[in-house]
Amino acid sequence: MIATLLYFVLVRSAVVEGALSLWTEGSGGDPSGECTCEAFLPNSTFPIGELISLESTAVEINHKLEIEISKVETYEVKLSIYIAKITNLTVLIKLMENNPDSYSELHLEEVKIKIMQVEALIVELQASLQTTSAVLITIREQISVMVSVLTQLEITYDKNLVLVTRREYLILQQKLEACEIRHNEIFNPSIGICNHSGIRRISKPIISQLNADLNAGFKYGGWGKDSKPLPGSENMHWYYGFTDTLVSKITLYSDYYKLIMRQVFKKHELYDRYKYDWQGTGNNYIVRENTLYYQFRPTFAMAKFNMTSATAQYKAIPNASTRFSYHYSANQNLDFAADESGLWVTYATEDSKGKLVLGRINEETFEVEKVWQTSIFKPSVGNSFMVCGVLYATRSVDSKTEEIFYTFDTRTEKESYGSVPFEKFQDSYVYLDYNPTDQKLYMYNNGYYVSYHVWFNQEGSRDKLLIG
């Protein structure tokens, strides 16, 4: 028992002595023998209040951005509605000018009211656009302030406490950039520039009206603009429609208004019983530099009709087959397309077993100068078109929806699968082509003129890319 008590006394003495030793190393004393302690604290504590304020600002900016993105999408719909209203109003005024006696003073008052309504809509849109631009500038300024504060916090304090907030800021910055890109794509499109990585989305269909022949039975045909217009013809539109796939003429209109009003600028016949037969077949033609490119009918070949000189030329494509057409229409054995990089034709061969072949056409020699073999079976494809040297192929999803499901990049020679859905307006169509002068898709759908706006994945965008 005595030994045990002696052991505890010795241990206690050692602990106290050690503690005093440690205390003395970090302390001081005065002559009276009293111990003093000095505590060293940092110059400042972590500004949690400032971090909470930043987090609150981030939430506020996120809410603002969501509102602005929603507004931009609303502007897109409004623009389509305004265009339709103005077009219809223009047609009505033209009819009144041509036959003024058929309209009463009440009709005139109704037209005045409609004009005032359109003016009010335009003023409203202009004000909305100015407000959106101002808000985006304010948001960017707020984010710049956040960057400065966060950078200073990272320098001064433990970075791990700041990185979560910094990641939130990066997400907000990406949303802002996406909103600004979307705004610029609608109101300042980069026409003719390929600084993007593929199609991101396609707008809802813009239905102009029934074809110029006012014939719903003309289910086969096409319409659009010149993909490389001659000077003075930048606004020219063209159209052709018929009850089957025969192509016997091409009709030109000096601008969109004249197309809607059915006021023909010029008509070119591809058949004269006593002189020539330059007719074509299939809904697969385009106009480029005032020249119609199409599939020749008298003999299977690609053809071009120069509308300036009214002369035609045709050349056979080696190994091209007449057995393989698109899903929606017969006789689309040769499909022509034009984009920012040139003139193209798609077809299939017996050697390819019906798989789509893409060829680039030399516009000077009118020869297919290079070909690429794809892996998609042409009869399963709804249609195809070219954008910036990339082939896009479509297929049906259901009776109301089509999708771009495949791409082939001629620059990298890589193909990719994905999905960019868009509305068809009606269950089937026979013509679809892209025009690089306005970055729109032109569709001929059961006798109706239909078009779509196209939006692209801009460089640096983190959106899911269709092209891999």
Image (cartoon, rainbow, N blue to C red):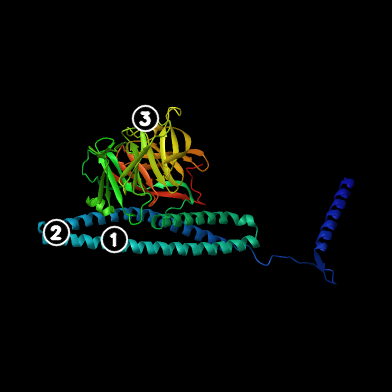
Q: Quick check: 92 above or below 364?
A: below
Specify which label sits upstream in the sequence, 1 or 3. Answer: 1
Q: Is residue 58 shown left or right of residue 234?
A: right
Quadrant location of the N terminus?
top right
Q: CA distance from mark 3 to mark 2?
A: 56 Å
Instruction: Using the image, tell me which numbered label, if any, was put on residue 107.
Output: 2
**Percent position (x, y) of residue 431?**
33, 40
Name which residue lies at 52% across and 39% down.
413
Residue 256 visible in image: yes
**Percent position (x, y) of residue 51?**
57, 61
* Secondary structure state at the residue bearing disc 1: helix
Q: Quick check: 355 above or below 203?
A: above
From this viewpoint, which residue is outermost toward the bottom?
A: 31
Q: Residues within 10 Å of mark 3 (few under 14, many from 20)?
A: some
Q: CA distance from mark 1 to mark 3?
A: 52 Å
Instruction: Check disc 2 and give the amino acid type.
Output: His
Q: Closer to the camera, 89 or 340?
A: 340
Residue at the spot of label 1: 121
Instruction: Check disc 1 and give the amino acid type.
Output: Leu
Name which residue lies at 44% across and 35% down.
357
Q: Residues within 10 Å of mark 2 (few under 14, many from 20)?
A: few
**Percent position (x, y) of residue 215?**
21, 41
Instruction: Check disc 3 and give the amino acid type.
Output: Thr
Specify which label sits upstream in the sequence, 3 or 2. Answer: 2
Residue 48 visible in image: no
Q: Residues within 10 Å of mark 1 (few under 14, many from 20)?
A: some
Residue at the spot of label 3: 322
* Secondary structure state at the residue bearing disc 3: loop
**Percent position (x, y) of residue 124?**
31, 62
Name which residue lies at 82% across and 58% down.
19
Q: Is residue 17 shown left or right of residue 333?
A: right
